[in-house]
Image (cartoon, rainbow, N blue to C red):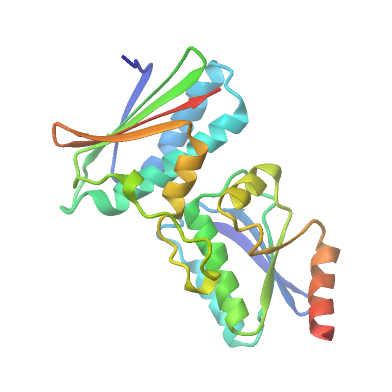
Amino acid sequence: MITYSKEIIVTNEISSIEYVADQFTAHCQTDSIDPKVIIKVNVVFDELLSNIIKYSYEEEGAHPIYVDFGYDDGRLNIQIRDKGLPFNPFHVTPPDFSVPLEERTIGGLGIYLVKNLMDTYQYERINQENVVTMSKFV
Amino acid sequence: MKYTIKETDNIQLIKILDLNNLLVDESLTEEVTQHIQQGNTEFIIDLAALEYIVSAGLSLLISILTRARSAGGDVVILNISDKLQRIFLITRLHSTFTVKETLEDAIEHFAKANVR
């Protein structure tokens, strides 16, 4: 059972990305986490929260996004949940790097980054929520 | 998003200071498009101020590169930190962009290209 020491609830607006990054950075600094790791995880937050903000909710208005994180026994644990449309980000087709740049589709680059920057990642649909759980060894 | 653009040796030098609000801010893309329409197709993009870059930022760089190359120009990336270098390697963009360490090298790249 993974436990998280910090839970944040934000809404689906762009300013939430910076807020989560600030909260995460401040929390990690108290645990003396390597700044390089903090930057990588903040890239991951930016990618995944951007996707949720842009695509997850069909209905206009403020909708919640739940962000949990914590440091435990040498690993950073992160969970992001939203109540939007079912969507497994890890099933997104990765970019085709063999195609010339001019013909390459941009989509999938962000999730490709997430997969490369985190050590573990998984998606579940639980109680009508998209639940993304990730960890990074530090 | 914050940036500056100034011209040096007929090359547009773009210093990107931050990439905040890229989801809604298309000002740099619009400004680059205007330059290309005016025949200014060579760009140096200085990333020294960036601690990290997300896919939206990479997409912006790709967009500028493809627009410039389509118009017969090019883009040189300048001052890429080790952290950004890793992102470029992961996304295999290191082989797509011309990356230089100094402004002089970047300007020389265009000078050589224009001689050929």
- Is residue A31 positioned above or below B41 on the image? above
**Residue A82 locus on image (x, y percent):** 24, 38
Q: Is residue A134 left or right of residue B86?
A: left
At horizontal 51% and vertical 41% (from top left) the residue drawn is: A116
Q: Quadrant of residue B52?
A: top right
Query: Is B17 in front, or is A59?
Result: A59
Q: Is residue A79 left or right of residue B40?
A: left
Query: Is B26 in front, or is B97?
Result: B97
Q: Is residue A9 left or right of residue B89?
A: left
Q: Quadrant of residue B42?
A: bottom right
Q: Quadrant of residue A34?
A: top right
At horizontal 24% and vertical 46% (from top left) the residue drawn is: A87
Is residue B53 at least partly visible in the picture?
yes
**Residue A96 locus on image (x, y percent):** 47, 61
Is residue A15 at least partly visible in the picture?
no
At horizontal 52% and vertical 16% (from top left) the residue drawn is: A74
Query: Is B90 in front, or is A54?
Result: B90
**Residue B89 locus on image (x, y percent):** 62, 50
At horizontal 38% and vertical 43% (from top left) the residue drawn is: A48
Looking at the rendered image, the quarter that the C terminus of chain B falls into is: bottom right
Which residue is at the far top? Answer: A73
Which residue is at the far front? Answer: A98
Query: Is A49 in front, or is A75?
Result: A75
- Is residue A82 positioned above or below B49 on the image? above
